[in-house]
Each structure stands twice: as structure tokens, then as C-alpha cells.
Image: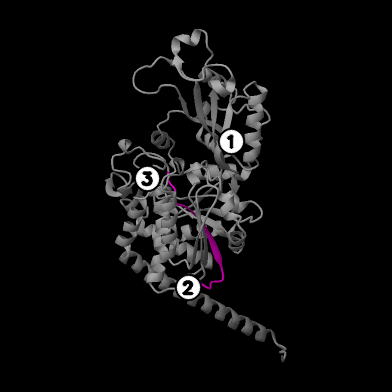
Amino acid sequence: MKSFRFHRRSDVRRLAFVVATAVLAAGTGLSHARSADQAAIKREVTKQHDASVKRLQDWIALPSIAAEDRNSREGVEYMAKLARDAGFQKVEILETDGKPGVFATLDAGAKKTVGLYFMYDVKQFDPSEWSSPPLEARIVDKPGVGKVIMGRGAVNQKGPESAFLAALHAICGAGKKMPVNLVLVAEGEEEIGSPHIGQLVHRPEVEAALGKTIGVFMPSASQDLDGNVTVSLGAKGVVELELVASGEKWGRGPAKDIHSSLKAMVDSPAWRLVKALDTLVSDDGNTITIDNYPVAPPISAEHKAMIAASIATRNEEKLKQQLGVSHWIDDLPLQAAYERLVSQPTVNIEGLVGGYTGPGGKTVLPHRAVAKLDMRLVPGMKMDDAVAALKAHLAKRGYADIEVNVSGGYDPTSTRSDARLIEAQMDLLRQVGLKPTLWPRNAGSYPGFVFTDPPLSLASGHFGLGHGSGAHAPDEYYVIESSNPSVRGYDGAVMSFVDYLYELAK
């Protein structure tokens, strides 16, 4: 190759100007092309609105509930169909020792690949507690919110996931090329603690595909009712389990329910369970006292600053009203209460079951009592260590007969704020006029550890505009048409995923 030599500074400056102009022109051209693509896609989103909402309604009508062993096979087959219909070329149903999952890939020939985590299962529900039938997914008016779709799984997570799939349909319908390649993992056991998620993610072919991604995100509805968005850098881990006290295992107390008058001469497994539970926490129930329990690291100055910046925009009294509480633990100020929320592990009693629980009284001495617990973990703690400490604690205190039945759970997850997956969210949210704040971690849990921990060591998080609420509760909803212009409706949520994919491709 012939070399060139510049004899004057003006030659150098002239070349630099030419190169800079060319680069700027190329970038501007790409930007205009991307904007044109997104405008065409937006028109397609509007055109497909009714079909997209109907797809969500049909999905809600098919509840897959792992805890009840309900519709798991039908649910995974439907999830696979949704992926194929959205353009994934390779879609496989993968068996596990529990409920099956889906592994799918979409190769667009793009330079970057992004991972997706979906769940197709939902929580249990009691139709008598709902104002609208939980499987009919009716569009109803919700004062102060707008038109919402109400049903089990509406926001957790079928609504946001369906909006993401609608984004793929719209890109295809507009005749545009997908800006990134996609790798999807979907499970059917998230609501029971994802006990077999590792059997999906750590298969060689799945791990290899995910290893090519820049990170993994879960579609969500991340806007509050005021339109604000908080970008979370992780989530607590969780252990779901039952403690079971019984006359059979204890060797004392009855082997079947007997008349309560006999309590004068027969031990009670129910009281034994209560006494064992009392050793797990302090008198106020707020500090874990399990012997040799994993220790949570102190909250960092960076995370304290994130909390301070976030709560500056929050109304404490309104928050208490929404939660139905009058006080935080120890009457802490909001900053300190939130610091506890993100940094402290918990032992929580979800439910206590034993003997007769119907109307009126029934004078029995139960032979068996069960406590359903969840234990939340923060980074630096491991699920296996927490369970081992609990079992050893009970044995040491003389309660070795109490069964510890772990149904699911996983370690906490954490992602750096400078990960591309996070930076792209912050950049995009600012571009659309929002003022996002960073949050250390969700107090709730999802099995992101399989992505963030070795061997994958990927960034992982949640993204999606729009709003919904009521997860795990009656009258769960997801906004279709928002009464607040700052909060995206369904089509706006769909476009947020389109925009995010283009932002990640930059």
C-alpha cells in the first residue's frame, strides 16, 4: 500500500475535517434510517392493537399454576407457539425434573445478541375475591388509571411479555429487520421459587447461546402511576419452605386430631411449631436470630445515595396509604426504612395452617401444624447456607423432628450500573422525557442469579414502560389505555420495547 506524507498542518486539519464530517454524516444517516424504521413500526403497532390485546386475553385465559400442577403442559406448548408466531426460528420445549421450559432463538444476522427471560406460570387465585373474573381478562375502567385488562397474570408477567412479543410482530409487520438477535428462556415454575431453572439455563446449548448475549432482561411494566421509572440493579434471593410439626415425627402428641379436652394430658404439635418459630426472630419479629445465619454486608454509600435520590420524588403518606400501613419498623424515617428494604434479609411467615380453620369453633387438638415461610436474601448470602443454618438451628434447639421442606428458591442477583443493559435503559428513558432513578435492588425476587452468577456472569434486569399492579393479589391489572399522558398504555409499552431493542443495537 502506498503511504502518504503530509507536509503542512493545514493538510492534517483538512483530512480530520473530512473524516469527522463523513463520520457525522454516516451517524446522522443511521439515525434517520432508524427513526424512519421506528415510525413505520409505530404505525404497525397501532394497526395490530386489537390482535395484540386479544393475544394477551387468550393467554390469561390459560393459567399455568405450578403449585397446583395445573396446565403446565398446555402452558409450555402455548408459550412455544407464542415464540414461533413472534418470529423465533428455533423453538424447543425442554423437560426438567419439574415443569418444562422453552428455549428459543431469533437470528436476525445482527451484530449484537440480547437475552430474554420469560415466565409462563402465574400465582393461584380465588375468583370470589375478584371484582372481575380472573380468567376472562375483561377491559374495565379503573378510576385514576384508565382502561385496564384485569386478570391473573395481567401484570405478572403476561401483560409485559405479550407487549414485548407484540413489538416483534410489529417489526416484522412493518417489513423491518430486527435490530438485534434474541435468545429466550421461559420457565413455568417462577411462582414456586424456580427450583429447576438451572436445568434449563445450564444445558450446554442454552448456555452457549446465552454466552453470546450482552445481557438478559425480563419485560416489565416499570412506571408508577405518576409516570416515574425506577431502574433496579438486582433483586433479593428467596427461599420458600414449609416447617411441619407432627405427632408422628415428634413421637409425642397425637397421630390424628383428637378432642381438645385431652390437651390436659397430651402434647400439642401446634404449640411446638409456634415455640420453634419464636426462636427464629427477635421478640418484635424484625431481626433474624437463627444461629450462624449468613450475615448481610452493610449497605454501601453508593446505594444510600441512590435511595436518597429516589425517595426525593416519593410521597411517604401516599405510599403508606397504598400499603395500608401506619408505621415503618421502629418508626424509622423513610430513608432508613428503604435502606432496610434493600439491604436486610428477612424471615417471613406467609401462612400458618393447623387443625380446624372454618367458621365457628371445633374443639380439636391437631396432630399436625404447618408454617409456610419465605426467607429473602441479599447479595453476599447464599440460599444453601441459609437453609443449612436453619436446619442446624432447629436441631440445636431441640426441634430436629420439625420437617424443613424447601419447595424452591435461589440466590440474590446484582448488576453494575455501567452495564450496557442498564445504560441503554437510562439513555432511552431520558430521551423520552422521563427522569429515571437507579435503585439498588428489588425487595422481591426473580431467578436472575442463573444469568449474573458464573459461568455466564451476565448483566440482568427488567425493562418496559407502562403500568400495572396487584401481582399475586385479587384484581391484578395491566394498563391498556392510560388516563395519565405520562404513563404509557399498551401500545406505548410495545413501542418502549421496540425503542429499547434499537437502543441496545447502537
State which tag comes first along the sequence, 2 or 3. 2
Is 71 or 27 nearer to us in this picture? 71
Any magenta on residue 120? yes
* Residue for badge 2: 31
Query: Which residue type carries mark 3?
Result: Arg
Q: Position of residue 454 (x, y in %)?
A: 66, 53
Q: Please tell me whether mark 1 sits on a helix, a strand or a loop.
A: loop
State which tag comes first along the sequence, 1 or 2. 2
**Residue 445, placed above or below residue 112:** above
Q: Nearer the viewer, mark 1 or mark 3?
A: 3
Which portion, as a residue range, is magenta? 108-122
**Residue 142, placed above or below residue 403:** below
Residue at coordinates 63% horizontally, 84% vertically from top-left?
15
Quick one: label 2, few (<14), some, or many (20+) residues within 10 Å?
few
State which tag comes first along the sequence, 1 or 3. 3
* Residue for badge 1: 344
Q: Position of residue 261 (x, y in %)?
A: 45, 9
Query: Which residue type carries mark 1?
Result: Gln
Would residue 297 be found to the left or right of residue 361 on screen? right
Q: Which circle marks residue 152 in the picture? A: 3
Q: Position of residue 370 (x, y in %)?
A: 50, 27
Question: CA separation, marks 2 and 3?
Answer: 40 Å
